[in-house]
Image (spheres, helix red, strand yellow):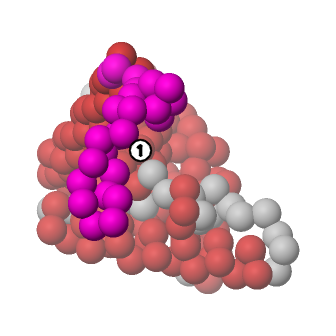
Amino acid sequence: MRNTIIAAVLATDMNQHFKGLAELKAALAAASVAAAADSPSADSDILNSVRLSSSPPGWSSSNAAQRLICVEMAIHASDVGNPTKPLSIYLQWVDKVMEEFFQQGAQEQALGLPISAMCDRSKAAVERSQIGFIDFIVKPLMDTYAQLNSNIGNCSIRHLSSNREYYANKLHQQQALAVHAANTIASSSAHETSAPATPSPTSAAQSVAVNGKRATVRFK
């Protein structure tokens, strides 16, 4: 039990994400091959009785290695699974996580250290970071984990899709506003460039006040 808990905690390290995901895929593939190779027997009912709910053939809770990788990935999926929650909950977690990142960046800056990625408040791109987080980290993990439990996987993937769409729409709106602002500035600059030049005082008739009276004076 102690070793299982330690392994599960260490599996939450993002440096281990791709390694853990690869191990889960390999374990699922091996279980599938083993199940296909096994001929039907009287033991098959026993195997099915200990199989995890909705899990694939060949995956059994009596297999220590399979059980461990399942626990590790379940903890890891929970740790990075904010985008799999309903939008109202997901947005709260985004705010909390980003604020934690920004505080880390502020401390790094105060210590004269390089500011870690996504930790610089002045350069934050929340929409892009969340889309990338979903596309490259969370969705591949959930797609694979869904093979262990399709009920959990389907629910998670449904929220993932709608939450990604939410941030994709926000990013599109920001880009549209940026393009509009750039076009407005360019149009204003072009208008100023093409406007008639202000007449020079040396050749223009100027209206000036002389002793409190208005008079027109032409400069030559």
Along the line of sight, which residue is nearer the eye, 8 or 32? 8
Q: Which residue is mark 1?
A: 128
Residue beneath the point at 36% across and 39% down: 217
Front position in the image: 13 or 186: 186
Q: Quadrant of the N terminus?
A: bottom right
Other-residue count near label 1 (Cα within 10 Å), few / some / many at <14 / 14–19 / ≥20: few
List the single residue furthest toward the top.
Answer: 194
Q: Is residue 23 left or right of residue 170?
A: right
In the rendered image, residue 196 lying in the magenta stretch gets the answer: yes
Magenta span: 195-220
Q: Is residue 66 left or right of residue 140?
A: right
Residue 51 visible in the current orientation = no
Please determine whether, in this image, residue 46 is positioned above or below residue 92: above
User: Which x, y percent locates residue 204?
Assistant: 39, 29
- Residue under the image location 82 percent in, 70 percent down: 113
Relative image position of residue 184 (x, y in whole percent): 28, 32
Total numbered labels placed on residues in the image? 1
Task: Specify whether residue 92 is in view.
Answer: yes
Residue 160 locus on image (x, y percent): 24, 47
Q: Give yes or no for residue 162 being in the magenta stretch.
A: no
Please tell me whether mark 1 sits on a helix, a strand or a loop. helix
In front of the other: 41 or 131? 131
Instruction: Please name the residue shown 40% across and 55% down the image.
Output: 126
On screen, residue 5 above or below 124: below
